Amino acid sequence: MQIITSRDNPNVKRIAKLTKRDNARSEGVIYLEGTRLCEEALASGQTALEVIVSEDRTGWAATFAPGIEPMVVSRDVFKKISQTVNPQGVALIVKEPVAASGIPFNNDGKDIYLVLENTQDPGNLGTMIRTADAFGLTAVIISPTTCDPYNDKVIRATMGSVWHIPVIRRTMDECFDFFINAKIDTLAMHLRGSEPGSGDLKLPCAYFIGNEGDGLTDETANRCSKLVKIPMKGKAESLNAAVAAAVIGYELSKLL
Amino acid sequence: MQIITSRDNPNVKRIAKLTKRDNARSEGVIYLEGTRLCEEALASGQTALEVIVSEDRTGWAATFAPGIEPMVVSRDVFKKISQTVNPQGVALIVKEPVAASGIPFNNDGKDIYLVLENTQDPGNLGTMIRTADAFGLTAVIISPTTCDPYNDKVIRATMGSVWHIPVIRRTMDECFDFFINAKIDTLAMHLRGSEPGSGDLKLPCAYFIGNEGDGLTDETANRCSKLVKIPMKGKAESLNAAVAAAVIGYELSKLL
């Protein structure tokens, strides 16, 4: 087993470059670090393109990624790659999931979509992906301006769900073309909306949630078939975006 | 109007010290900075003990805190206090809300309590306080090990709700003594729980949510009258703590 001990080794430099999300994105890959993130990805069937471990973690590589020759580096070199003070010494490069060409569609009358327009907070996005997975939604669709779902903070907040449910980037035009054509109800979560009455929530359904500060754009809200608002009997004027996504996702999942 | 231009002015040093949460806590006060946080606190009736503005923001002080002589400092001195690169130039010192001696109790048969045992993430805590306020809960009760509700990140995430709903720190012993005595149902949110059936959710009710990673301690879960779990038809094994708090809070608020 060869242990790379030089920070100037070209493979070390190449991996270090991929820890920057912009570089990884342009190559269509994701850098994952730490046991939880790496093990979740492997357990969910992601294929490791490369496995990088510090010299004391070769056992981890043999256990979790047995089919692939790991790049083994000294602890010092791992720290240079990781740029954290106490790294766990395990990292993976995985391929970014390829977006399906269309929008996933089970066509069993039970499709539920969460559509996010311009979500900016990685923790919110990750939590919404996790919630959508928990409630059995068909897919999470994100607008072109929504933050990167393979950002480290998003992946952490999904607790593995980013590998379980399709997360695809589409324009609002593409969404409405598809939903109208497939006769899927479209609900805008909106503070000017009305509380959903009996029959307002029905499947198949796509529900739209806007930016944390500004909500949905008027353009998108106006294209939806209904504007709905979660009943709030207390004093706060609005709910956190991920909380709103959860409450409606939960109500819709009762219809599954 | 006197403008303080020296970073060594004793009042500047005193305020700078209070920007550290530990120092402010030991004096029973909270340092708030930025227009949104300061305006939310004032709009919610908090009394400013001190108003600190940079020389270009005296108009803000006159508008939002008219009854109090502001401490006016140069932009440079404000930056030293704030330790941010582009501060908004407005800050307040407010008194920490005094915890009621008991547990707030409307005794109208509709009390709902959210009890948090060892919540560690400030964003989660803030979101849960906001949600509890939105759904009209009586109070949020936090265990001794739960993070500080007047931490800057928590206050930001509450969007003002930290000033609307009582957030009180109590031991689990104090909680159960009170709930049992007042005949308030106690629900543990727990992955080993069962999905609530009709009649399982009834008011008055206290529901308990544990630490993000570990859930509720066995000791606390065992003291609750029921263990309940949110129905999840998808693949994720669990929900984010703030999402779980929202879904049950939403269901309970339907009974209000």
Image (tube, coloured by chain):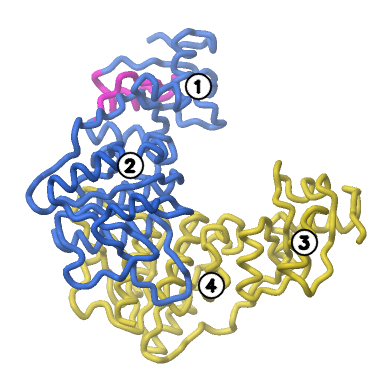
Chain colours: A blue, B yellow
SS category of the residue bearing label 1: helix
Give the mark toward the camera: 1 or 3: 3
> Which image quarter is the C terminus of chain A in?
bottom left
Label at residue B59: 3
Q: Amino acid at mark 4?
A: Val
Label at residue A227: none
Q: Is residue A159 magenta?
A: no
Find the magenta span and give its range.
A46-67
Quick check: can you spot residue B188?
A: no
Q: Which residue is mark 2?
A: A142
Quick check: can you spot residue A133?
A: yes
Residue nearest the viewer, comparing A13 with B220? A13
Q: Position of residue A167 (x, y in %)?
A: 28, 39
Mark 1: few, some, or many residues within 10 Å (few <14, many ≥20)? many
What whole-number distance in Å separates the C-alpha atoms at marks 4 and 3? 33 Å
Q: Position of residue B82 (x, y in %)?
A: 73, 50
Label 3 in the same subunit as label 2 = no
SS category of the residue bearing label 4: strand
Side of A29 where A80 appears, left or right: right
